[in-house]
Amino acid sequence: MGFRGKRGGGRFRGKKRGTISNVSQAQRHHFRQFGECHPSEIRGEVKKYTKVEDSVAAPTAKVEPVLESSSESEEETSYQQLISSIGQTAKDHFESSGEDADSGAQSGDDDIGDEDDVEDDDDDVADDDGSDVHEDGSNVDSNLDEDDVDEDIDHGSELEDASKSDSSSDGEENDRDEQKKTVKLLRTKRKRKLSECVSSSEGEEDKDNPEICLKESDPFSIHFERDLAEDVAEELSDKMKWEKEEIMMPGIGKAFLQRLKPDLLPKSDVSEKNLEKLNVKQRLCAQVQETNRTLCQMDESGGKLSTLQLSMFRVLNTYQDVQFPFRDLVNGEKLRLVYCLHALNHVLKSRSRIIAHNAKLKTKQTSGDEDYRDQGLTRPKVLIVLPFRQSALKVVDILTDLIKDQGKVTVSSRKRFKSEYGAENDEDFRKGLKPEDYEATFTGNNDDHFRIGISVSKKSLKLYSPFYSSDIILASPLGLRTVIGAEGEKDRDYDFLSSIEILILDQADIFLMQNWDHILHTFNHLHLQPKESHGVDFSRVRMWTLNGWSRFYRQTISLSSVFCPEINAVFNKHCYNYAGKIQFIRKPENGAICQIIAQLPQIFHRLECSSYNQLSDTKFNFFIKKLLPHHKDPVMSQTFVFLPSYFDFVRVRNYFKKEDVNFVHLNEYASDKGITRARCDFYHGKAHFMLYTERLHFYRRFKIRGIKHLIFYGLPQYPHFYYELCNMIKDPKRRTDCDNATCTVMYSKYDAQRLAEVVGSNRASLMLNSEKLVHMFVTGEDD
């Protein structure tokens, strides 16, 4: 079987006429030059060309072009038939020459999800990095001047068609030869133009060449390309073998460093201030200062980052686990910029690595035995857990600003994102004058049920991409829980958590006010074996991922405004980073007790219990046997009972109902009418007790009037809640005297950190180690 014969057909003269009649001379030339047929070179014979796109296909699976025709013989056309007709010489010549205009193509694993958004949005656009999707699903990043090249191809094809029609006449051989020379000249011009475009694009990319950016000293390469020994992996799971020492982190303060072996610790230059020398992508370095100035209100001379930001980034850049309990109103947005820069830098480095390896594999620069392990079981690499939608909006704004290149950036579905994550009218939530921290926390969209995938490319962000086509996932604890589901549910999915390399918990203290069980549920489903392959190329998956050691490489970053035992427990139990863990020390000097303006005697009762499981029963028994009988006296009317835990609230409320105690209660599930009625009854003395939960105070920040006596069933999570409630006793609108007001606090050794936040670290140490079980403070006088 061969090509149809043609007068003056050169090497095809004498060939038997075959059934492949729909292949033009242009396509034959294309096959000789590039080793494959391209449907765009076929003129008139092909009825329809369909490009196959599969967003969940295997990364390395090559999708062949589908040529549809009305003739059955045309459907049987294959590359093997073409090879048998033209001969193997053309293909061998192509492979030896190594001329490929698509040498910068990226595999399907990095291009999944780059198809157009299904939403009808005016802002939905494709990636703005000059990339085109080819038949094999790859993404070409070569910036070729396609209009000029196609113009030459079309011109040459027209001359070929003219040549083909004129060749039927023997008397016009000279004209046909002249036209052939013209076609040959145009083809030479096209080949030269392709070569110039490729070399030009390569020159432009030298400043951000993947091979240059990812040096052997790059923390990304050091951390993720190190293969642990099997005995080391077994030791990492045993927390008893970890060493702990106190270190000083420049620009931040004291911290505890936990490590398994000293030789596994990363090396970092604590004095380096240049982001480029810290292996940050050049396009990100150019935008850091502007982003910091516009979105973080930071205007410091002498550097792109503040001292805290630079010190924190140096810590994050080592890929060690970090627990930072100093997040506040001043440094909150600055820290957000730091971890966004770190996450985006990580994603771009991973993308660059994959592109470089794909280029080598495609141009056959490597030997047959060499393979590249640069991917995980699924595509998502970074998971950022946030409390509210307005936090996700701020993260996306920072990511968008950082990825700008000379003011150009493409963000798909931007209008939809702004409408769904923008500000909402929550006037009912913020009635009256509220504290500054409350306004900062609840300004904007406070919806706590969301999740969104972000696909990152060279100069663009694609929002609302499917999880398995995303590089970064932003979600709330509730949003993750609804996707992960519970055991036994049919529509549950957690495969996207199998290859998370960076986990960021921002404002982790707020998660305790939502539902901490959702966080624990997420940790329990990290790095589990996926139920489906999701189109992964197992030849490119890292060996330590296949071994089930992903948790030893994952970096966990926890940012909170307070130090909580629950956060500390997760950090110790679920973080196994072989590079070590850094836990910053928070030692309050004076405590929140110094902010109380009323002269109020405060009695602290230390409860003795042998284990944490017995603490709840110990507090309840002490309350009903020691405190409640004394406060039932009519002299102790209008007693306000603060309960940090909702479970303790339910237990005390049920007891009060059973004993027929005169009380009202306020909790986060109460209606507005019920809250108004309870506050009114308590203020006018109709109710002897009021039960009040910390979660309600966090979300509503009510100012309760009429309080004469305070009982802290437990110390609050937020230390400023302590002095806020104490200061409510001094009400300038009240006509009665408040000199007889009292405050009683219950605490145990398990409340050491909360006690230090209230009374100060030095006083807390004395109170916990003293033989006395009762201590009293009177604000306004010497302690």
Image (cartoon, rainbow, N blue to C red):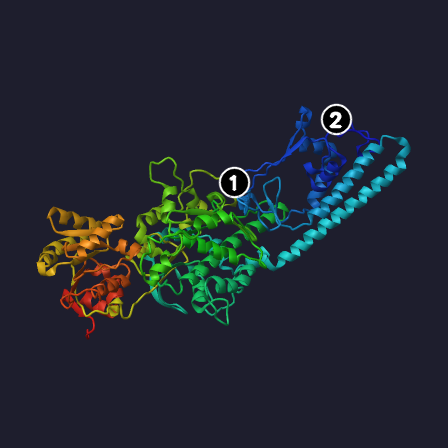
Between tags 2 and 1, which lies in front? 1
Q: Looking at the picture, how far across and down is residue 358, in whole percent? A: 58, 47
Amino acid of disc 1: Val
Q: Is residue 673 left or right of residue 631?
A: right
Judge the density around disc 2: few (<14), some (14-19), many (≥20) Cα neighbours within 10 Å. few
Furthest residue in direction bottom, as rendered: 782
Q: Residue at x 80, y 43 (%)?
A: 184
739 vs 608: above or below? below
Q: Residue at x 68, y 51 (%)?
A: 198
Judge the density around disc 1: few (<14), some (14-19), many (≥20) Cα neighbours within 10 Å. few
Element type where label 1 sits in the image = loop
Residue 118 numbered tag: 1
N-terminal label among 2 and 1? 2
Picture quarter with the C terminus: bottom left
Residue 18 numbered tag: 2
**Is residue 475 visible in the rendered structure shown here?**
yes
Picture quarter with the N terminus: top right
Element type where label 2 sits in the image = loop
